[in-house]
Image (spheres, helix red, strand yellow):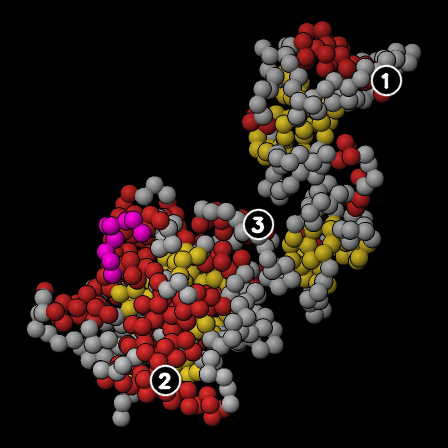
């Protein structure tokens, strides 16, 4: 009995076959018969003939309909193009007699796809260096902002490999070199195996006169690389190496909360649509080793494995057991793999129970991680488009870890005390160490300033770190005049020495800047802005004084990390003169070294500074 496959054929193709195909070959006859049977089944069900339906297709019939679909890719009819692409996803199901027609599922990361002329560009149409068959396969691929993917013949795969090998040697961008190296490692062996089959089929090369090996049953977990990538013929077993092989590398990325609502099964890397998942995938593409997804429902997934839509959170109801994932790892032979995990705390914790030495390079909240991922794939950071799902990856943290030991307010989602079940809908709160009292920390609503809860510094809580809400203003600053709450559109962060036009011993001017406070590893944003004058006061020190009152705000040295911004010309105006009043009689005695510096300062600006300090000390004693 002839073996058939049940595949969904778009209505446009099915109707085209029954109307126009005049069967001459066995495959054409079988295809027409299957399409006519589908039309009768639709009629029996009382459904419209424009509906798609599953057809029982022989291998020869599948080859015919795929050839028709490829011809439709250049159609001016958008519906025909969509129908063709829907049909061509079954290209890997076809088993051609001619090995030159064997297809490989290829994925080009963004960094590599950007180096190739895309089929929709005018340059691609004019380029005569690309072989015609390669162009035809490239037209059938999907080209998006995150890369390109599709099923190509061995000739096209060889063309891509030639480009990638060239880029590994000479490309100036490290991320492109890494992605090219990974592409070669992934696809070189499937290409060479198919090339041997082609040589044997054509009677050329070292395989002349040899018949292709009989086809083997589809593997499940037998081979590491084939399962992960879901492409190419089964890998041949190699003789054991004389030297112990290097540990396999594997990149594991967390599944996403945001998913495509397309019905039925689609490839896993198309099911997850959130920006965080996309960023992890782009970063994984430039790392060594193949990539798999750690799914809350399915466990370890190859990128191309087709899955249905679901709504399950890691560790929640319906989530896969960790023991089942461990069985997948053992079946794949990945117990000793060198693993890098890209994902939130829950996924890192789970991965480290499977691979204790797994690397987890991402730190901080989702916004910070998106920036770190952008640095890995050397592109623009994506926005967090899953605030209610992905960002809520709860961690058990001690309250003292969430408080900044200073004046900066920290923000996090508060899921309650860790000894209780986590409140998945916990509110966003802010906490400030200077508001603490006896070890108690008051968690405040960022919008209203009301106290949501109070937690001791030694207590453990459920938390997800977060950034300050956009436009947040400290409660005590609310209601102040707008000029006191100025926030520059662009500002810099770095060493104080990077501020241009600083005064020095030989340059006694006083430049004016916006000062946003000190910066540091844990201080990622300015806490507010103040317009200040910068005065050199000797010994490598600079005084920052208020632009209007001239009261000292901060003393800095060149290595200090600060936030600063330029002052626009219309802002850099001297304040209106204020009539000076004589200090009260009977003031404090000014220290002798203050008076000496006021008389013998290194620069005129330093002398003016110390004169102000003398007057201030005479009045206040400080």
Checking the image for residue 603, the label placed there is none
**Would you place residue 44 above or below residue 461 in this image?**
below
- Compare marks 2 and 3 and give the one earlier in the sequence: 2
- Give the alpha-carbon distance from disc 1 to disc 2, as whole Å: 99 Å
Question: Label 2, on which residue?
Answer: 35
Give how far across and how far down residue 282 sits, in percent. 44, 55
Question: Label 1, on which residue?
Answer: 619
Q: Quadrant of residue 225?
A: bottom left
- Give the alpha-carbon distance from disc 2 to disc 3, as whole Å: 54 Å
Question: Label 3, on which residue?
Answer: 368
The residue range painted magenta reads 125-133
Residue drawn where x is 59% and y is 33% of the image: 492
Give how far across and how far down residue 20 sits, in percent. 32, 78
Residue drawn where x is 51% and y is 60% of the image: 277
Q: How many marks?
A: 3
Nearest the viewer among 297 and 263 is 263
- Compare marks 1 and 2 and give the one earlier in the sequence: 2
Asked whether the beta carbons under mark 2 and mark 3 sit within 8 Å of each other, the answer is no
Nearest the viewer among 211 and 41 is 41
Q: Quadrant of the N terminus?
A: bottom left
Q: Quadrant of the C terminus?
A: top right
Give how far across and how far down residue 487 sits, in percent. 69, 36
Camera-near label (2 vs 3) is 2
């Amino acid at each position: 009995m002839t073996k058939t496959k049940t595949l969904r054929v778009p209505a446009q193709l099915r109707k085209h076959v029954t109307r126009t195909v005049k069967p001459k070959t066995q495959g054409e006859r079988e295809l027409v018969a299957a399409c006519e049977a589908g039309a009768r089944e639709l009629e029996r069900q009382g459904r419209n003939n424009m509906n798609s339906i599953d057809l029982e297709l022989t291998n020869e019939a599948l080859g015919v309909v795929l050839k028709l679909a490829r011809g439709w890719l250049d159609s001016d009819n958008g519906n025909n193009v969509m129908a063709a692409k829907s049909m061509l996803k079954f290209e890997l199901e076809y088993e051609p007699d001619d090995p030159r027609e064997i297809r490989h599922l290829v994925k080009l990361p963004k960094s590599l796809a950007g180096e190739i002329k895309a089929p929709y560009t005018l340059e691609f149409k004019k380029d005569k260096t690309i072989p015609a068959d390669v162009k035809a396969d490239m037209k059938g691929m999907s080209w998006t902002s995150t890369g390109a993917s599709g099923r190509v013949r061995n000739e096209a795969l060889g063309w891509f490999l030639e480009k990638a090998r060239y880029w590994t040697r000479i490309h100036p961008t490290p991320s492109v070199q890494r992605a090219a190296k990974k592409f070669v490692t992934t696809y070189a062996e499937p290409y060479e195996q198919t090339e041997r089959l082609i040589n044997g089929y054509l009677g050329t090369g070292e395989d002349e006169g040899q018949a292709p090996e009989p086809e083997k049953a589809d593997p499940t977990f037998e081979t590491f690389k084939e399962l992960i990538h879901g492409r190419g013929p089964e890998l041949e077993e190699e003789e054991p190496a004389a030297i112990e092989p290097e540990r396999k590398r594997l990149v594991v990325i967390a599944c996403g909360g945001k998913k495509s609502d397309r019905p039925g099964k689609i490839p896993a890397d198309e099911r997850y649509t959130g920006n965080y998942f996309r960023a992890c995938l782009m970063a994984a593409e430039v790392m060594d080793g193949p990539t798999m997804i750690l799914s809350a429902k399915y466990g370890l997934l190859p990128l191309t494995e087709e899955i249905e839509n679901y709504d399950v959170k890691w560790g929640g109801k319906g989530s896969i057991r960790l023991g089942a994932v461990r069985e997948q790892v053992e079946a794949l032979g990945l117990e000793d793999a060198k693993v890098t995990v890209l994902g939130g705390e829950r996924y890192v914790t789970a991965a480290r129970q499977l691979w204790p030495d797994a690397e987890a390079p991402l730190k901080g909240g989702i916004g910070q991680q998106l920036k770190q991922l952008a640095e890995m794939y050397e592109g623009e950071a994506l926005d967090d488009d899953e605030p209610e799902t992905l960002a809520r990856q709860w961690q058990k943290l001690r309250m003292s870890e969430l408080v900044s030991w200073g004046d900066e307010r920290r923000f996090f989602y508060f899921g309650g005390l860790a000894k209780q079940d986590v409140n998945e809908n916990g509110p966003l709160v802010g906490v400030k160490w200077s508001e603490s009292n006896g070890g108690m920390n008051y968690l405040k609503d960022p919008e209203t300033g009301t106290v949501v809860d109070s937690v001791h510094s030694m207590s453990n809580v459920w938390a997800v770190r977060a950034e300050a809400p956009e436009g947040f203003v400290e409660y005590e600053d609310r209601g102040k005049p707008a000029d006191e709450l100025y926030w520059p559109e662009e500002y810099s962060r770095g060493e104080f020495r990077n501020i241009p036009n600083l005064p020095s011993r030989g340059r006694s001017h006083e430049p004016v800047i916006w000062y946003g406070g000190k910066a540091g590893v844990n201080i990622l944003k300015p806490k507010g802005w103040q317009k200040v004058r910068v005065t050199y006061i000797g010994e490598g020190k600079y005084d920052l004084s208020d632009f209007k009152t001239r009261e000292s705000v901060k003393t800095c040295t060149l290595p200090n990390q600060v936030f600063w911004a330029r002052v626009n010309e219309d802002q850099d105006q001297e304040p209106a003169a204020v009539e000076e009043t004589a200090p009260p009689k009977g003031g404090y005695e000014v220290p002798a070294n203050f008076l000496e510096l006021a008389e013998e300062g290194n620069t005129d600006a330093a002398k003016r500074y110390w004169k102000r300090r003398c007057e201030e000390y005479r009045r206040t004693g400080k």
